[in-house]
Amino acid sequence: MQYNHIVFDLDGTLIDTENAVLNTWRYTLETYGLEYSLEKLRIVLGIPTFDALELLDASVDQNFEYKWIHNYSKFSAQTVFFPGAYDILQFIKKSGIHLGVVTSRKKTEYKSYFSKFNLEQIFDLIVCADDTLQHKPNPEPLLYYAQKSGTTPDSCIYIGDMPTDIASANAAGFASGLVTWSHSSVLKTDADYIFSSPEELLKLYNI
């Protein structure tokens, strides 16, 4: 089936933010006297800040998120598009297929993380965490995307690098795609498609 909308996660899917995100977490937690290894901090990837703090059982104050965003600037230079991702996005966009984003990051985080990439010039709609009450793996963010785009879930595919991305897509009635070009260790998944390189996205279409 050819999908009219390709919707992406950002962190770890299109943009390699892993080192920047993990180092910012470690640096910010250290300001509270909390020490975590980078391996232990991997559980924060792909989920909202509050949920991550709960998983870490980290005792911090209400200023944590503000400090995190401020500290991210120390590491943001480490973020780049995964090789080939930008060119494929441009090619797909020129082919008339709608491109979208659903991210677990709040609007303030999105601006701090991704403003340098000028993503608004590529994507028709960008959905952030504070656009919906529920977050991945709940289907609400993807259903919100479909509603705002004036389309139906069965015309969309959602592509990400984490089990929460696949679960959200499947629950929303989107086709689901897992990327393996990132550093994700996810091997077993119930995704409809697995993509080992950005170029493999073209297999969805006769382009």
Image: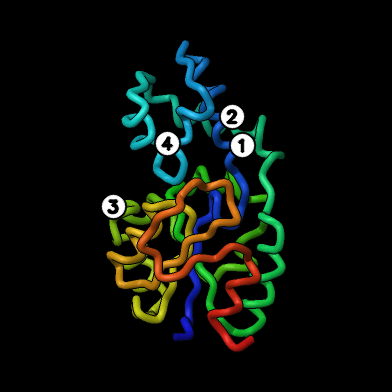
Q: Which residue sits at x=41%, y=37%?
A: 49
The secondary structure type at the circle numbered 2 is helix
Residue type indicated by callout 2: Asn
Residue type indicated by callout 3: Gln
Q: Residue furthest front?
A: 188
Q: Position of residue 27 (x, y in %)?
A: 56, 22
Residue type indicated by callout 4: Ile
Measured in 3D between alpha carbons, the distance from the residue under mark 4 to the one under mark 2, in whole angstroms, is: 13 Å
Per the image, the residue denoted by label 1 is: 19
Q: Indicate the quadrant containing the C terminus: top left, top right, bottom left or bottom right.
A: bottom right
The secondary structure type at the circle numbered 1 is helix
Discs 1, 2 touching: Cβ within 8 Å:
yes
Q: What mark, if any, has residue 23 been given in the picture? A: 2
Per the image, the residue denoted by label 4 is: 43
Q: Indicate the quadrant containing the N terminus: top left, top right, bottom left or bottom right.
A: bottom left
Q: Is 87 on the left-hand or right-hand side of 62?
A: right
The secondary structure type at the circle numbered 4 is helix
Measured in 3D between alpha carbons, the distance from the residue under mark 3 to the one under mark 4, in whole angstroms, is: 19 Å
Measured in 3D between alpha carbons, the distance from the residue under mark 4 to the one under mark 1, in whole angstroms, is: 13 Å
**Crowd rating for badge 3 (residues with CA inside 10 Å; few <14, some 14–19, many 20+):** few
Q: Which residue sits at x=46%, y=81%?
A: 3
Discs 2, 3 touching: Cβ within 8 Å:
no
Q: Position of residue 144 (x, y in %)?
A: 34, 66
Q: What mark, if any, has residue 35 been given in the picture? A: none
Q: What mark, if any, has residue 134 been given in the picture? A: 3
Which tag, 4 or 2, sits closer to the chain's start? 2
Tell me if residue 56 comes above or below residue 157 in the rendering. Answer: above
Discs 4, 2 touching: Cβ within 8 Å:
no
Q: Which residue sits at x=53%, y=80%?
A: 204
Which tag, 4 or 1, sits closer to the chain's start? 1
Q: Which residue sits at x=55%, y=33%?
A: 22
**Which is closer to the viewer, label 3 or label 4?**
4
